[in-house]
Amino acid sequence: MHTSAAPVIERRKLDFHEIDPLVAELQRLRDGGYRRSGQWSLSQICDHLAIFVRGSLGEFQKLLPWPLRFFVGKPLLRKLLRTRTMHPGRRVPAVLLPGAARDDAAAVDALVQLLRQFRDHRGPLRPNPLFGELSREQWTQLHLIHAAHHLSFLTPTSATAGGTP
């Protein structure tokens, strides 16, 4: 019996600790082009990330039940913040999936504007549906880890301003 191995997905190692280097990487991918090794285009990644950034600013509607937040969410949050990695291939609820690919430049510009709005926001942040109440720093790091995960599936095709993160 012959079994074929799963295709090897080529990913970059990215780890952002502040919003400005993430913005620079988004602009580098927008301006210089990229090669995909995952399922989503740059615009789809931006649209997906934007759902979470908008959610932290107030668009999440309801929290998951407290036992799930406490027994699953809190340990998962600690692990994410400690390892700064997310595992590929997790199923995502349809409401969090991006739509069809669209203009990369427009999607990047919209996400950059939203990230800057998040960075400059001084009011309260909404609890995360799975993790519950988060500090501003936890929300920031969660967004950065999430962005690094998805952008790791895109490899720049040209060296442009912005350098390597």
Image (cartoon, rainbow, N blue to C red):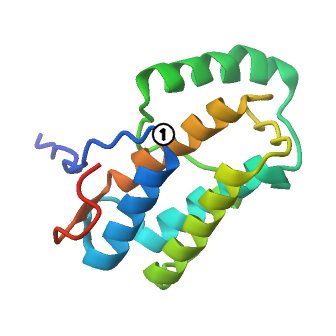
Q: Disc 1 marks which amino acid?
A: Ile
Q: How many marks?
A: 1
State the residue at coordinates (33%, 59%). 38
Q: Can residue 71 be seen from the camera position used here?
A: yes
State the residue at coordinates (41%, 46%). 148
Q: Where is residue 82 shown, x and y percent of the image?
A: 47, 19
Q: Where is residue 77 shown, x and y percent of the image?
A: 61, 24
Q: Nearer the viewer, residue 74 or 14?
A: 14
User: Is 34 on the left or on the right of 50, as rendered?
Assistant: left
Q: Which residue is mark 1?
A: 145
State the residue at coordinates (37%, 75%). 30
Is residue 157 positioned above or below 88 on the image?
Answer: below
The crowd level at tag 1 (other Cα within 10 Å; few <14, some 14-19, many 20+) is many
Q: Where is residue 141 shown, x and y percent of the image?
A: 55, 35
User: Is 108 on the left or on the right of 124, as rendered?
Assistant: left
Element under disc 1: helix
Quarter of the figure with residue 161? bottom left
Is residue 72 positioned above or below 144 on the image?
Answer: above
Q: Where is residue 11 shown, x and y percent of the image?
A: 25, 48
Q: Can residue 97 be seen from the camera position used here?
A: no
The quarter of the picture where the N terminus appears is top left
Is residue 134 positioned above or below 89 on the image?
Answer: above
Is residue 17 positioned above or below 56 on the image?
Answer: above
